[in-house]
Amino acid sequence: MQTEPQSPAPLQQYLSVLRTQRKLSPHTIDNYSRDLLELQTLLGAAGSEAPDWQAINQFQIRKCAAQLHARGLNARSISRKLSAWRGFFGWLSTEHELASNPVDGVKPPKKSKPLPKALGADDAIHLVSHHDPAKPDDSTLAACNHAMFELLYSSGLRVSELASLDLADVRDGGYESASWIDLGEAEVTVTGKGGKQRRVPVGRAALQAINDWLPLRARLVRADGGPDGHAVFLTERGTRMSPRVIQLRLKAHGRTAGMASDVHPHMLRHSFASHVLQSSGDLRAVQEMLGHASISATQVYTALDFQRLAQVYDQAHPRARKTGGK
């Protein structure tokens, strides 16, 4: 038989209600019990050996939640504990007169967003410049891949923007280019999220790769032309390259290049942003080139940059090196 945890009468009564009236499972009741006993401990640590539950206020609950966060507890776990506490005080208000539920309005910390995955500069250059020994450098497939991957890294394009690129700004009947490249000006004009257009420079390596690709591309253009005939990047069948095909090609290319993890087009976009920011420190310029509507979306790369610097410090600074001894 499961023994009731040693706890003050109100907690015992509430747990009994959960078991007998709400018919919750023993596992769920155990979770509630642990969360509520932890609250009791936190309140005790705040200076109350036996909490007067009716006197607990929102400030004390916020302080308890902050203590959990300081211990490294994740946002999901804190949210679960707040829910358990809220339920207890909600029940307590039906048994005793409470001015308000002290947990109402207390929110868990925001879930931390994972940092974008970016390649180091050497890895990014190795990836986009790598030639698969199984494919001749002048083959149509190799030339197309090289041009696409260099341009993704050179200009930080989304894969959909790369796929939509035309050779020029075309206005032909009912067809209008969404994005296009201007080799003379060494830039691309792309239509991003929300229909917002932006112009982004294209680097020398990407320009050279595109110029190497274009003569081979001309052989793939269908006689009937059509909208696909305007596309910069074509498949072997003469159709516009799709985002999915680009993703699959880059993933396969990454394997042949010996990359440690799967690579995808957005990883090159992240790498572009991180490396430009490291070199220039100009957050606004990176925001414009990425086409972010808000600077907050770009600021994540400052954290990525700091993370990289911290890794370099840990590896290089003699006082930062971890040793097995004390």
Image: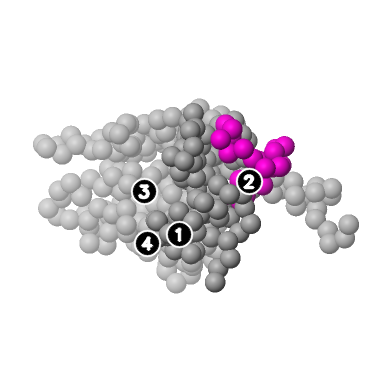
Whether label 1 touches label 2, CB < 8 Å: no
Is 140 located above or below residue 149 in the figure?
Answer: below
CA gap between label 4 and label 2 equals 54 Å
Whether label 4 touches label 1, CB < 8 Å: no
- Label 2 sits on residue: 40
Q: Residue furthest right?
A: 326
- Label 4 sits on residue: 248
The kind of secondary structure element at disc 3 is helix
Q: Residue at x 30, y 43 (%)?
A: 165
Foreground pick, 193 / 257:
193
Foreground pick, 163 / 308:
308
Residue 103 counted in the magenta span: no
Q: Residues within 10 Å of mark 1 (few under 14, many from 20)?
A: some
- Label 1 sits on residue: 19
CA gap between label 3 and label 4 equals 12 Å
Q: Residue at x 37, y 62 (%)?
A: 248
Whether label 4 touches label 2, CB < 8 Å: no
Q: Position of residue 81 (x, y in %)?
A: 53, 48
CA gap between label 1 and label 2 equals 20 Å
CA gap between label 3 and label 2 equals 53 Å
Residue 48 counted in the magenta span: yes
- Label 3 sits on residue: 159
Which residues are drawn in magenta? 36-57
CA gap between label 4 and label 1 equals 53 Å
The kind of secondary structure element at disc 2 is helix
Label 4 sits on what residue type?
Answer: Leu
Q: Position of residue 12 (x, y in %)?
A: 55, 53
Asked whether the viewer can see residue 201, the reply is no
Q: Residue at x 52, y 34 (%)?
A: 102
Q: Which of disc 2 and disc 4 is earlier in sequence?
A: 2
Q: Which of disc 2 and disc 1 is earlier in sequence?
A: 1
The kind of secondary structure element at disc 4 is helix
